[in-house]
């Protein structure tokens, strides 16, 4: 990597880390998606490590790894109550999230070593992706689950590229490690199951193309078996004690049933309204009926009102600007994914198959989840953080090509990316940007009761 490029990437990493450290300390302690309920769960575990019943509280139905790690951290630091654990947990979560950016850089650098600019772009996309930034400030399991998912899929993507892929005891040890990472993702969030399937599918595709399906099947079975041992016991326990793998529609979540819109139609998945850019808050009538519009708003901005304050016209202006600038990396993602699909078909050793399988499974699961849970609060890009590395891998390819072209094209792309990064820094560095000055007594979130 050229010295100037290395210095630039180092500066971006320092800025991205600095934003997350600032937010960990300055973002109000009990704000964020489910933060109050997550804190209560940690509070219980600080008193006793006994695993509660799923319907004990709002968050006790979730897989327990994030909450136990928070409680263990609190006990190690001598925390008096859960409030003392919030900032340390946020810092650890932010560190895990920075690891995702490193994994994106590592994957691109390994598979495309002649293009160091692309590796830097891949890392930068995750460092400044708004949903990644603001979720790193919340007491929430999403970043940890995405980090374990990313570790498993990147390790598997590199593994299938080995020329001696199915040889030696070390390969089986690496598979056990991949299975353990996937199992930890599963023990953090049910969506971890998707990376288990993606890794197994990539292994089978590699084996079929190499004419060695049985060794591939054995290696895939090892990954699945280790993942089941590490993360599957929680779900088996649920079946044994409560009769279901994962709870749905518990009485503790009854308030969700009154949230708008209350039903989903096919058109909700086919339409992205103009309000996505002109009025980016998820209770807008058009966005309530647009799953992908709301998802786009929460990925590249924050339309749920849990990080950025509501009611300030400067916030809407900044949101519209960021969402317009985000069209560039979004378009790059589409172009890069098509190229990746071609590589996956032509070369089973390419990492694209594992990344595309994870992406497809995650999007399909997201559609099923939002269909069966038809409320605005369930439409969040944070549920898609597990495909953060595939996003960075695919989008970085055309972006780096456009930058390398130089001339007007390169200058325009560089200017747009620079403006996007600057906007994210200003808007999502909590307490520094002028739109971060939330009035005292104003709670986060949108007043959905009136809409409901």
Image: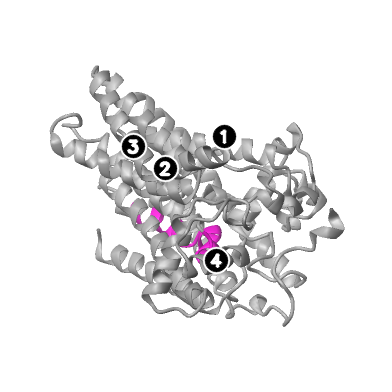
Q: Tell me where residue 452 appears, x and y as whole percent.
A: 84, 53
Q: Tell me where residue 55 appears, x and y as whole percent.
A: 63, 52
Give me the disc on residue 351. Answer: 3
Residue drawn at (63%, 50%), measured in percent from left and top? 296
Q: How far is disc 3 from disc 2 in space, using C-alphas? A: 30 Å
Which SS type dominates the magenta stretch?
helix
In the rendered view, would you say 444 is above or below 352? below
**Mark 2 — residue?**
233
Number of the front mark, 4 or 3: 4
Question: Which region shows up in magenta?
Answer: 119-140
**Mark 1 — residue?**
364
Q: Give the left or right position of residue 305, taking residue 147 as reference.
A: right
Number of the front mark, 2 or 1: 2
Q: Residue 34 is drawn in which quadrant?
A: bottom right
Residue drawn at (57%, 70%), measured in percent from left and top? 428
Q: Secondary structure at mark 3?
A: loop
**Residue 98, magenta (yes or no):** no
Give me the disc on residue 138. Answer: 4
* Residue that sits furthest to the left in the current view: 168
């Amino acid at each position: 990597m050229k010295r100037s490029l290395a210095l630039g990437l180092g500066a971006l990493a320092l800025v991205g880390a600095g934003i997350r450290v600032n937010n960990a300390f300055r973002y109000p302690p009990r704000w964020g998606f489910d933060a109050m309920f997550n804190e209560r769960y940690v509070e219980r575990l600080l008193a006793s490590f006994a695993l509660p019943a799923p319907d004990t509280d709002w968050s006790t139905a979730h897989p327990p790894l994030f909450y136990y790690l928070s409680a263990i951290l609190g006990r190690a630091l001598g925390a008096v109550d859960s409030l003392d654990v919030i900032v340390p947990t946020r810092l650890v979560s932010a560190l895990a999230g920075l690891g995702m950016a490193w994994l994106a850089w590592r994957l691109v650098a390994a598979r495309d070593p002649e293009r160091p600019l692309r590796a830097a772009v891949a890392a930068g996309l995750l460092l400044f992706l708004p949903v990644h930034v603001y979720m790193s400030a919340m007491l929430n399991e999403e970043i940890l689950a995405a980090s374990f998912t990313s570790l498993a899929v990147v390790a598997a993507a590199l593994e299938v590229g080995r020329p001696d892929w199915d040889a030696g005891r070390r390969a089986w040890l690496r598979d056990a490690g991949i299975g353990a990472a996937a199992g930890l993702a599963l023990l953090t969030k049910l969506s971890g199951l998707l990376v288990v399937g993606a890794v197994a599918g990539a292994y089978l595709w590699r084996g079929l193309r190499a004419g060695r399906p049985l060794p591939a099947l054995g290696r895939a079975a090892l990954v699945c078996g280790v993942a089941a041992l590490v993360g599957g016991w929680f779900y088996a326990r649920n079946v044994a004690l409560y009769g279901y793998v994962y709870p749905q529609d518990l009485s503790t979540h009854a308030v969700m049933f009154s949230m708008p819109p209350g039903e989903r139609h096919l058109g909700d998945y086919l339409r992205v309204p103009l309000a996505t850019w002109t009025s980016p808050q998820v209770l807008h009538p058009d966005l309530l009926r647009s799953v992908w519009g709301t998802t786009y708003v929460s990925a590249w901005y924050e339309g749920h009102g849990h990080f950025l304050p509501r009611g300030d016209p400067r916030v809407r202006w900044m949101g519209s600007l960021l969402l317009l600038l985000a069209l560039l990396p979004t378009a790059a993602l589409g172009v890069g994914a098509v190229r990746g699909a071609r590589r996956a078909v032509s070369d089973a050793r390419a990492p694209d198959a594992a990344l595309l399988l994870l992406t497809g499974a995650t999007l399909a699961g997201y559609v099923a989840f939002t269909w069966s849970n038809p409320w605005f609060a369930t439409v969040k890009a944070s549920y898609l953080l597990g495909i953060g590395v595939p996003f960075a891998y695919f989008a970085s390819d055309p972006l780096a090509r456009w930058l390398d072209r130089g001339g007007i094209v390169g200058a325009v792309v560089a200017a747009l990316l620079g403006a996007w990064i600057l906007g994210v820094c200003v808007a999502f560095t909590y307490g520094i940007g002028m739109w971060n000055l939330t009035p005292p007594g104003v709670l986060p979130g949108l007043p959905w009761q009136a809409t409901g």
